[in-house]
Image (cartoon, helix red, strand yellow):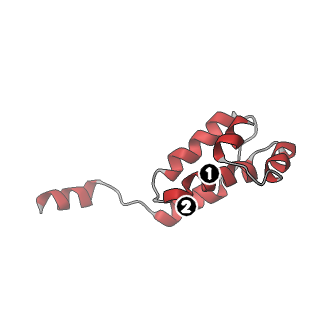
Amino acid sequence: MARNKFENHFIPKLNVIFELAKFYMRSQITDEPVNNYINDFYCIAEHYSFGTLKDEMIRDKIVIGIKDKVLSQKLQLDAELTLEKAIRQ
């Protein structure tokens, strides 16, 4: 019981709506390396139980949010696009 009180007092609760908003609104920043952009999605996604959809959610955000619009359109046209394929491009 004392541990619960301690944790409730000192460990901040996760604001799921705020964290999901960060995930959905995230786009690649000018001059940001693609690897940093992708890694950020993995970090943000750790707070959620996307389950089997995790890779698809990250893949879609990469395709939608990258600055290179030509590459984004190319990735959008690949009906068999996986997260691994998107990262290799």
Badge 1 or badge 2: first in the primary sequence: 2
Quarter of the view holding residue 84 = top right
Distance from the alpha carbon under mark 1 to that under mark 2: 12 Å
**What residue lies at 80% left-to-right and 50% top-to-bottom?**
78
Q: Position of residue 75 (x, y in %)?
A: 79, 48
Q: Amino acid at mark 2?
A: Leu
Element under disc 2? helix
Is 82 on the left-hand or right-hand side of 52?
right
Is 9 on the left-hand or right-hand side of 34?
left
Is 75 on the left-hand or right-hand side of 46?
right
Q: Position of residue 53 (x, y in %)?
A: 56, 58
Q: Which residue is mark 1?
A: 58
Element under disc 1? helix
Residue 32 appears in the picture as rendered: no
Q: Amino acid at mark 1?
A: Ile
Is 6 on the left-hand or right-hand side of 28?
left
**What residue lies at 74% left-to-right and 51% top-to-bottom?**
80
Please count the marks in the image: 2
Q: Residues within 10 Å of mark 1 (few under 14, many from 20)?
A: many
Q: Nearer the viewer, residue 17 or 77?
A: 77
Image quadrant holding the N terminus, namely bottom left
Q: Which residue is mark 2?
A: 20
Q: Foreground mark, 1 or 2?
A: 1
**What residue lies at 72% left-to-right and 49% top-to-bottom?**
81
Q: Nearer the viewer, residue 80 or 12?
A: 80
